[in-house]
Image (spheres, grey):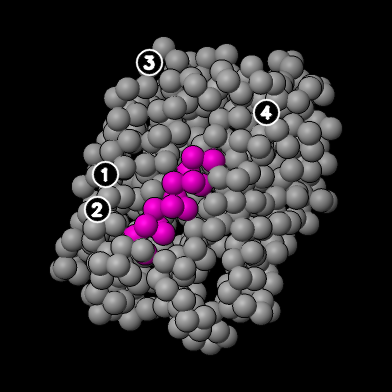
Amino acid sequence: MDALTVDSSTGQEATKSQYRFVIAGLIVVSHLALGLNFYSASPVLPLIIEDYSVSHAAAGVVVTLGILGFALFGIPGAVIVSRLGLRNSVTLGTALMTLMLLTAVVPNFGSLLALRLVYGLGAALMFTAQGAMVMRWFGTREILIVNGVTTGAVTLGVTLSVATVAPLSDIVGWATALSIFSIVGVVATVGWLLLGGRAGSASPTVPMVSRKVLREMLFNPTVLLVVAANAGLMIQYTTLSTWLPTFFNEIRGMSLSEAGFITGLLPFVGLFSVLLGGILPARFGHQRLFFIIPGVMIVLAGPGSFLLEHIGGIYASVLILGFFTWLVIPSILSVPMQMRDTSPEKVSVVFGYILTVEGVTTFLFPLLVGGLRDLMDSFVIGFGICAVFALAVLAAGVLIPKGDIEPEPAMEPA
């Protein structure tokens, strides 16, 4: 069993090893697999509603139940990772995500929901372990860049699936289309089995995550602000990603393909901004600024995506929202790795904490929006409630204590 706490000399050897690029490649493929199935059902929810004769609220569970897996397995996942080891945890996580291959043959709506829950559990296990793995194998400056690239893989997966699932469903049916997106998970799982043998070998074995570490990280002010920022960000993003295709189809009169294309711009523009979100703070410093500026733009662009009726305004709002949402994510993921006296053990706990709170909130709020749509025949009220929570990103940028993050000198220009 490999450990979560790093011996300094061994950790320094890992951050200089060429093998870290193999680790990075495997993590990127795993995140691509995660992204391909994360919101893939959103553009075809009207088809799922029709095929299974379920309500909007029930159909929304198809997307959010995977996120609930994050909540169920977040903090417990940190403890499980410390027992299974990093490589075993990531391999098992990607294997569980890959079970979405069975979507094409599930007999009923309940079976579809079960697959989504298993996918979420696997994604949570993989994500929790990879945070400690990144900290173990990469230096401080590299962490932001690696987090940017791996998050970019998620956005690529989300973009491809959201933009193509509707036209692909016209050819093979929505269930088979969702299964196709799971093939990359097979590649990731096999990759970890064949190439990931040294992934957890950079430090000595240590005991399980202690209660002291759990208490310390769960109530740390900086951790609380980062967790709140991530939750507020994802409440709005997940809710809009889930319901904008249906909103555009039912309220704005767009086809499912057009609605899916516009919603797909949210992660598509993130392909570029997430890389900038990793490179710019590493190069120039001033990481708090990369909370504040996105925080302002997200609060403005989110409501614009559903309040504006002109197609130009809709496109502009979606592009701005997607760009700044993904721009801030590398900073959110990197702050726990840059805090004073941090360790892979603590980072694993924080990542589990982030997943738990994000999972609970982003499971409930899309259901709230779907329920309000059924009860009040309106998406706007629910969308507006979710937009308020996005203010947490701006608040974190203002309130994170400066002394809690290790000062990192700006990267020298090449």
Residue 136 is tagged as: 4
**Residue farthest along the front direction in this orientation:** 375
> Which of pointers 4 and 2 indicates the residue nearer the eye?
2
Q: Which residue is mark 2?
A: 384
**Helix, strand, or loop for circle 2?**
helix
Q: Is residue 299 visible?
A: yes
Disc with the residue nearer the chain's start (1 vs 3): 1
**Residue farthest along the bottom direction in this orientation:** 171
Q: Which residue is mark 3?
A: 402
Q: Tell me what residue is drawn at x 50 percent, y 84 percent.
A: 51
Disc with the residue nearer the chain's start (4 vs 2): 4
To which quarter of the image does residue 315 belong?
bottom left
382 horizontally vs 195: left or right: left
Residue neighbourhood size for the residue with mark 3, other residues' Cα within 10 Å, grouped as few (<14), some (14–19), many (≥20): few
The alpha-carbon separation of the residues under discs 4 and 2 comes to 41 Å
The alpha-carbon separation of the residues under discs 2 and 1 comes to 7 Å
Which amino acid is tagged 3?
A: Lys
The quadrant of the rendering that contains the N terminus is top right
Q: Is residue 283 visible?
A: no
Disc with the residue nearer the chain's start (2 vs 3): 2
Residue neighbourhood size for the residue with mark 4, other residues' Cα within 10 Å, grouped as few (<14), some (14–19), many (≥20): many
Which amino acid is tagged 4?
A: Arg
Q: Tell me what residue is drawn at x 47 percent, y 26 percent.
A: 223
Give the magenta range. Answer: 356-370
Disc with the residue nearer the chain's start (1 vs 4): 4
Q: Tell me what residue is drawn at x 52 percent, y 80 percent.
A: 52
